[in-house]
Structures are given as structure tokens and as C-alpha cells.
Image (cartoon, rainbow, N blue to C red):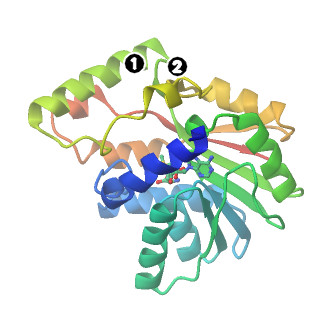
Amino acid sequence: MTILDEIRRFWDDDAATYDDAPGHRPTSPASQAAWTAALEALLPPPPALVLDCGAGTGFLSLMAARLGHRVTALDLSPKMLARLSTSAAAEGLDIAVVRAPAHEPPGGFDVVMERHLLWTLPDPTTALRAWRQAAPAGRLVAIESLWGDADPLEALRGRAWKFVQRRRGTPPDHHGPYPAEVRGALPLGTGTHPRAVAKLVGEAGWRAPRLVRLRDVEWASTLEHRFPERFLGLTPRFAVVAS
Ligand SMILES: C[S@@+](CC[C@H](N)C(=O)[O-])C[C@H]1O[C@@H](n2cnc3c(N)ncnc32)[C@H](O)[C@@H]1O
């Protein structure tokens, strides 16, 4: 089994419960509104041709389609894409779906966007280069979080958060752990830092990477929590935008 087969299997197994985690699919009106405002500011005016790489169950795809963009959702996992299509149909949104690896995207787009995909790519630079070909005169919007051992303080905060959540009996975000041998083969598999994302984006040939902190998204999400989680704060979220 190749590494991409193992990754696909993990996400196929995760598809049924992925949207249950509030960090994956926030449902509060304030969080929805904050995400909508953030995405609207990051994308060009609609209608743009938007490719969502590693679209999963469609959090970004659905929101971009609601904003009036023409969206294509690409993912390795047929089960994640099936859930995206069900959600799109329920809202009457027309979203094209492509089952492919991130480094083999179709072309002809104004924007390539992604959320939380880069960490699980065995070769993020090759994918970022391929996305440039997919939108040669367009824009990259890479939405990520600062997590894991990329930053020692964040790692400490994340461990404290997980400890509190376990004590509360909150279900974990995923059906199981990422296979250790897969994680070990991923350059960003143990943490993502804005520094690393901006560097990779520049190295892949995208011009003038800009860093945007998604503070309103964090704030809306923080308001959903009680002490001590609210005091501990949430994973910082950010976007790297490039042309
Ligand atoms: C953490 S989820 C993010 C899903 C979605 N972007 C979101 O924000 O909710 C990662 C997604 O990337 C997909 N994925 C992982 N590796 C991939 C690859 N090499 N090519 C395409 N999709 C991939 C997985 O199937 C999964 O749906």
C-alpha cells in the first residue's frame, strides 16, 4: 500500500464523523459569520473559478459557493467528497467534484485554496508548484493553524487543552490516530508554523506571500467555550495569500 493509499483510507474512515468536531465544521452563527467574512476578504470578487484542494466534506467549498464563486472540490477520499456532494445538494449549490491527488490538479482557475491540507502532503512543494500551473495568473489562499511541535509554547497550550477536553469526556476530533509511519513521512506532519508555510509558498514560485491572522474566526470560536478552555485560548489560525 502506498502512502497516499494509507492517507486515503484514513480519511475515508474519518468521513462519517469529521463534521462532528466543532473545529472542523463550526455551526454557531457567530463562527459561520466570522468564517464567511474571512473567506470573502481572502478571495477575489465573485464569480471566480475556485479550486479547493483537499476539500474534504466541503467546509470552504460550500462557503465559497454561497459567496457566488464557481467551485471545484478536489480530494483523494471518495467518502469525504460524497459528504460534500450531499451537503451541496441539500443547499442547492452546484460544486464540481474531482477525485485526485493534490499534486495533479485540473487547470484553468483564478484561485487555488486549501484548509488544513498542507500538513498531510508527503511533498507540499510539488503540490504548491502544481497549483501555480492550475492558476497561473491567479491567487493562492492557504488556510492553516499553528499547531504541534512547530512552536514550543503552542505545543504546551495544545497539550493543556487536550488534557482538559479528555477530563470533560469530549470526543476526539478524529476516529483514530494518524498512522505513525505516515506522519513520520510528512514534512509538516508534526506541526505547522506560518514561517514554514510562507517559506514553502515562496519556494514553489508563488509571488509576494502575505500572512493574515484570522483573529475574528478565533474570537468567535473562543466565545463558544467555558473556563478553562476559554482562558487557554485556541490554536492560532492564519492564511498565507500569494499571487
Ligand atoms: C484535515 S482534512 C481538511 C478538509 C477540508 N479542507 C476542511 O477544511 O475541513 C484533509 C483533507 O485532505 C485530503 N487529502 C489528504 N491528502 C491528500 C492528497 N494528497 N491529495 C488530495 N487530498 C488529500 C483528505 O482526504 C481530507 O479530506
Q: Which residue is mark 2?
A: 150
Q: Residue at x 70, y 66 (%)?
A: 50
Q: Residue at x 30, y 50 (%)?
A: 21
Q: Residue furthest left?
A: 168
- How many dots with numbers? 2
Frontmost residue, 107 versus 151: 107
Some atom of ligand 1 lies within 8 Å of the CB belonging to the residue at label 2: no
Per the rendering, the mark at residue 171 is none
Q: Which residue is mark 1?
A: 155
Relative to 63, 234 lies left or right? left
Q: Position of residue 11 (x, y in %)?
A: 45, 51
Q: CA distance from mark 1 to mark 2?
A: 8 Å
- Mark 1: amino acid: Ala
Q: Please give the name of the residue rendered at 41% of the width and 20% of the height, measured from the top-left corner.
A: 154
Q: Secondary structure at mark 2?
A: loop
Q: Nearer the viewer, residue 70 or 73?
A: 73
> Can residue 81 be seen from the camera position used here?
yes
**Residue type at tag 2:** Ala
Direction from residue 96 to residue 104 in the image, left or right: right
